[in-house]
Image (cartoon, helix red, strand yellow):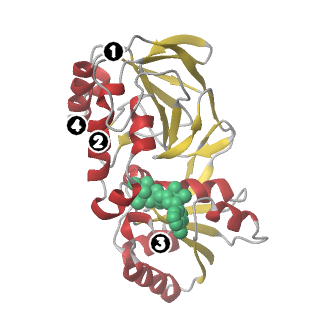
Amino acid sequence: MNITVIFNPTAGGGRDRRLRHFIRTLEQGGARVRLYHTRAPGDAIRYLKGLEDQGNCVVAAGGDGTVNEVLNGLRPGVALALFPIGTANVLAKELGLPRRPEAAAKVVLSGRSLPVTPATLNGRRFMVMCGVGYDAWVVDQVDLILKRRIGKLAYALSMIRQLARYGKVSYRVSVDGRPLDCFSAVITNGRYYGGSFVLSRQANIARAKLQVLLFQRSGVWFLLGCLVALMMGRLERRDGVASVSAEKVTVEVSRYLAGSAVRPVGEAAWPRPGPEPIQADGDPAGWLPAEIVLENQAVPVRVPQ
Ligand SMILES: Nc1ncnc2c1ncn2[C@@H]1O[C@H](COP(=O)(O)OP(=O)(O)OP(=O)(O)O)[C@@H](O)[C@H]1O
């Protein structure tokens, strides 16, 4: 088996020793391995697109951002595999993948292929989820230097800083043509969020459908209640949260609402109309408006037998 491994040396704060174990196990299992260290954001896509022959399988050795880049550079028919060494690794959690190097390598060598249907966000593929509103601002404003030092905690700090933003902009989300309004939305392919929190019990990564979660009430207390419900795995049961399945979703700003005395730390003028970010698979992915479409072909993903 020919395997290309794309290693993001910045994912999860750097995991060189674990990578060596992983590669050694692949080679001991008879695989021919080509290893590439990424040098910057977007490098994995460029590198993979330039490869005439990607082998039987491309392994994303990193977190969800690395998987996202590999997915965007992957040739049709080539299998995707994961060595989860990122910060949150939501897709790995979704697929029940092991994190230990030897076990992860065994899944690549002798696992089965699960067809997973990705979606596109304004033409760029994503595997797990994208979001607008509160969670997009949290991702957009996270301190990346702090993230390397303290991992997921950097997101917790960004979440606190962005609380005051929630409810100041409303969005018009069209779900398979049906217009709905909200103050935040997450469009997901899978069940999990931020690691191991259950976002949606209706979503399933093996199903060719997206699940759209809409946060339809404003107010910081409502948002805090949603975060607690998320931690308890009961988000979809909360009043003010709608959960609908879809194949095509568009999102645009509906309106900017009246100001607030509270403003996020570091914001000079607040609130003000401006570009609204989108996140995809936990990384910034541009600005609204957004068109999200389920693809019509699945990608084979290596999972445990
Ligand atoms: N050599 C590099 N230097 C800086 N950034 C890089 C490099 N290679 C890849 N990247 C970028 O790093 C970002 C974060 O990587 P990734 O998401 O895999 O790790 P993570 O954030 O630790 O994990 P997770 O997304 O699971 O929380 C990716 O969006 C990718 O574009």
Could you say where residue 74 lies in the image, as x and y percent from the top left?
67, 59
Mark 2, Cα crowd under 10 Å, few <14 / some 14-19 / many 20+, is some
Residue 100 lies, with reference to residue 234, above or below; the image says below
Can residue 60 be spotted in the picture? no
Report how far apart the C-alphas of labels 3 and 2 lie in the structure. 26 Å
Pair 4/1: label in front: 1
Whether disc 3's CB lies below 8 Å from ligand 1 is answered yes
Q: Specify the label residue 87 is tagged with.
A: none
What residue sits right under mark 3 in the picture?
9
Residue 140 lies, with reference to residue 112, above or below; the image says above
The type of residue carrying mark 4 is Met
Q: Specify the label residue 197 is tagged with.
A: 2
Q: Residue at x 33, y 15 (%)?
A: 218
Please tell me in which quadrant of the rendered image residue 102 appears: bottom left
The type of residue carrying mark 1 is Ser
Report how far apart the C-alphas of labels 1 and 3 lie in the structure. 40 Å
Q: Secondary structure at mark 3?
A: loop
What residue sits right under mark 4 in the picture?
231
